[in-house]
Amino acid sequence: MNNQNIIELVKNFWLESPKNKMTNEYGFAPESAIGMPMYGEPIIGFADATDPYFERLKKPEAIGEHHNTPAEWLPESKSIVSYFFPWSEDIKESNRKDAVHCSLEWTEARIEGEAFLVAVGEFLKAEIEKEGETSLIPSIDKRYGSGLYELDGKEEAHAKYRSNWSERHAAYACGLGTFGLHKGLLTSVGAAGRCGSIITTLKLEPTKRPYQGLYDYCTMCGDCVKNCPPEAISIKEGKNHEPCFVFMNGNRLEGQNVFVCGKCQVNVACGYGIPE
Ligand code: B12
């Protein structure tokens, strides 16, 4: 199994899986959103598990010591597969209409869309197993910490807003894109979307990263600065996670742990691709 096979598997899954259609299982979206495709065509990239980039993420200025290397997740690992799924036009459009409140379609897609990413990982894992190789999906591993909740009560296992497996940093390593001023991953299909990854013992060819700097794809145009309801982003200071989180927390619907906003990903120059 090679890179091209993996790319085709992921794209076919995206095309054929009913899981990419909103069911409104969590009841956030209007009835009219049932059946709405959540994601557009994905991009997929690969990295070598021994890429020194992962070791560098342990530096406090990058993420921190608690960020696990691929080998710490899966000792015999050889490669990382990262996938970025841009939101469908319907989902993006829904969140463009109101400058402050997050759309209900975006809210529902935050949950169902994450379940879809897990399904992609599980599907790939099963396909790779047919080749006699193993894989691990960090985001559903019992050791995973998002940086938003306590992990088994062990503080050292994670740090505030810093996961022990950062999907954007994995995507950066896999050549999928750079960071933007808004700190989202900025890709050839834009910044509005979500990403996931698996770590595998299968040997795959690493994607050559077409950039060198952390923010190479960002023009610092300031669209996200203007859009951010809690004013968490500035050209001079970059993005501050605390007001972003506090605002998203306030957006939560009663009794639900769904943190949403996404205004830095719509009505921006990087909404569809790398800005000129
Ligand atoms: C914690 C978290 C948050 C926090 C913090 C956000 C953040 N940027 O880290 C809060 C609650 C605020 C948040 C908000 C949102 N989130 Co969030 N979040 C996460 C989570 C669980 C972990 C993120 C993490 O670990 N960050 C680590 C820190 C270190 O990242 P950072 O500060 O941005 O990174 C900087 C440093 O590392 C530095 N750096 C890197 N290398 C080096 C080296 C040197 C030498 C130096 C000096 C610096 C340096 O540069 C980076 C960029 O500035 C991830 C899922 C995952 N496991 O990855 C989703 C994730 C980042 N979130 C996501 C989304 C979509 C959102 C929201 C849009 C909410 C929504 N669903 O509507 C908002 C806004 C995002 C934004 N603009 O930042 C997506 C992002 C998709 C994308 N296009 O990039 C992710 C990847 C989830 C997913 N599976 O797709 N989120």
Image (tube, rainbow, N blue to C red):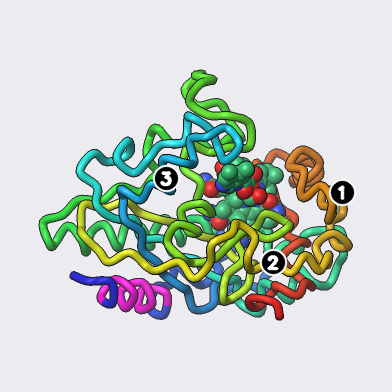
Mark 2 CB near ligand 1 (8 Å cut): no
Residue at the spot of label 3: 54
Residue positioned most to the front: 212
Along the line of sight, the residue nearer the viewer: 259 or 170: 170
* Residue 3 horizontal/vertical position (percent): 28, 72
Disc 3 marks a residue whose amino acid type is Phe
Please, what is the three-letter code of the amino acid marked with disc 1? Pro
Q: Give the distance between the C-alpha atoms of the residues marked 1 and 3, in whole angstroms.
A: 32 Å
Quadrant occupied by the N terminus: bottom left
Mark before the other along the chain sequence, 1 or 2: 2
Identify which residue is drawn at 41% across, 80% down.
15
Q: Position of residue 167 (x, y in %)?
A: 50, 52
Residue drawn 54% across the image and 62% down it: 212
What type is the residue that disc 2 sits on?
Cys
Q: Quadrant of the C terminus?
A: bottom right
Q: Which mark is residue 218?
A: 2
